[in-house]
Image: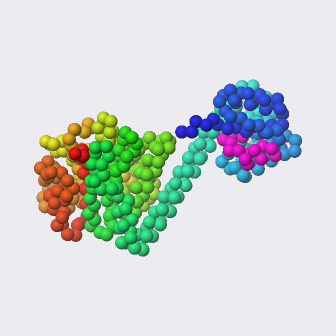
Amino acid sequence: MSTNPVKILIIDDEERAREILVAYLEDSGFQVLQASDGQAGIELCRHEPFDLVLCDLRMPGMDGLQVLAAVTHEFPELPILVVSGLGGMSDAIQALKLGAWDYVTKPIEDMAVLEHAIDHALERARLRRENREYREHLEAVNEQLRQTVRQLREDEAAARRIQFQLLPENDKVYRGYQFSRHLLTSQYLSGDFVDYFAIDGDHLGFYMADVSGHGVSSAFVTVMLKSYMGRYRELYRQNRDRGILNPAETLSRLNREIFGCHMDKYLTMFYGVINWSNHQLRYSGGGQFPFPILFDGEHAGYVGKKSLPIGLFDFANYQTESLQLPPQFALVLISDGILETLPQTSLRDKQSFLLEIVGATELTIENLIQELGLDQSGSLPDDVTLLLIKRAK
């Protein structure tokens, strides 16, 4: 976060009034500039970035109402407070109609009243700015998605290349952790997606997602997911938000984003964060099934519990769980398309078979593909994605 002090401009023709306000506000930690008339104040606004303006109402030449009209026209997001000892309710109403954010009467007997009005206006300005930035981000994301969908429809071969270019580097090693992935698509474009990335010097994030349906519409949701996760990481890098470190909070945000888009699409997802310093995994599931399988060198078991998908229900809640990663381990994530390729008849038998495969196989992506019969499956009924995480040798 920026540590620069809040910069305030005082526009008042009374020198003594300005001196009193400047002294108090500077003692309160604000940076204060002053102008003795309306035109000088407007010129300062044009050359200096201010966080807030305090303006007297009655001034010779250009009065406060004219200053209000000019400033709100040229700088609509700049908070401007009227501070005046003349006039009555009609002046206050007129000032508010012209764009004043608040009205404080002179003489100011309690400076805390003024500071409260300033703090309130600055908070409103911050919220409005964040809402605008959020809307601009969504507009940019939507435009990116529209362009991507056009590309997908115009050239599926190019679309497939675009989608696969978004995937992370295979067999990537981060500080002793090796990530391997493989994506097998039932159609030319996939609704499955996987990603892993360094969040900072201490944390590593990864996720697997499976969008409902197939084809273009599901594929472009994976593009949107990649964009949202990139946005959360950027907010963290700017020290504005630490949500990317909290798996449950990340899934909750994605749920609101996807649900709010009204695309008639939802996805299942598992998101985990590994702390390199203590080898702890914090994770949250959003309807992901089958659950990830953790193999500690002797035993294989499922990790996770039942949860709601992302983007299907606005009331969905998610929980962050944690576990200590063994010195030697492998974590295997497989999308639910695998269940349609296995020969076993019952779901319980399919789950048991997956545990047996993970516990009895020298774990590499290539070996998993072979043991699961995915190297000779031909046309698949659904996308199948594999993600293998283990300690690098």
Q: Quadrant of the C terminus?
A: top left
Give the tally of numbered discs.
0
Residue at the outermost right position: 60
Q: Is residue 113 visible?
A: no
Q: Quadrant of the N terminus?
A: top right
| Position above or below: 265 against 361 | below
- Quadrant in which residue 158 is drawn: bottom left
Residue at the outermost bottom position: 154
Magenta segment: 38-54
Q: Is residue 299 left or right of residue 232?
A: left
The x, y position of residue 274, in whole percent, is 32, 41
The x, y position of residue 84, in whole percent, is 79, 35
Identify the residue at horizontal 50%, vertical 62% (top origin): 143
The x, y position of residue 29, in whole percent, is 65, 30
Identify the residue at horizontal 66%, vertical 48% (top origin): 77
The x, y position of residue 40, in whole percent, is 80, 44
Front position in the image: 311 or 170: 170
Based on the picture, tell me whether residue 157 belongs to the magenta stretch: no
Q: Is residue 62 left or right of residue 115?
A: right
Q: Is residue 164 visible?
A: yes
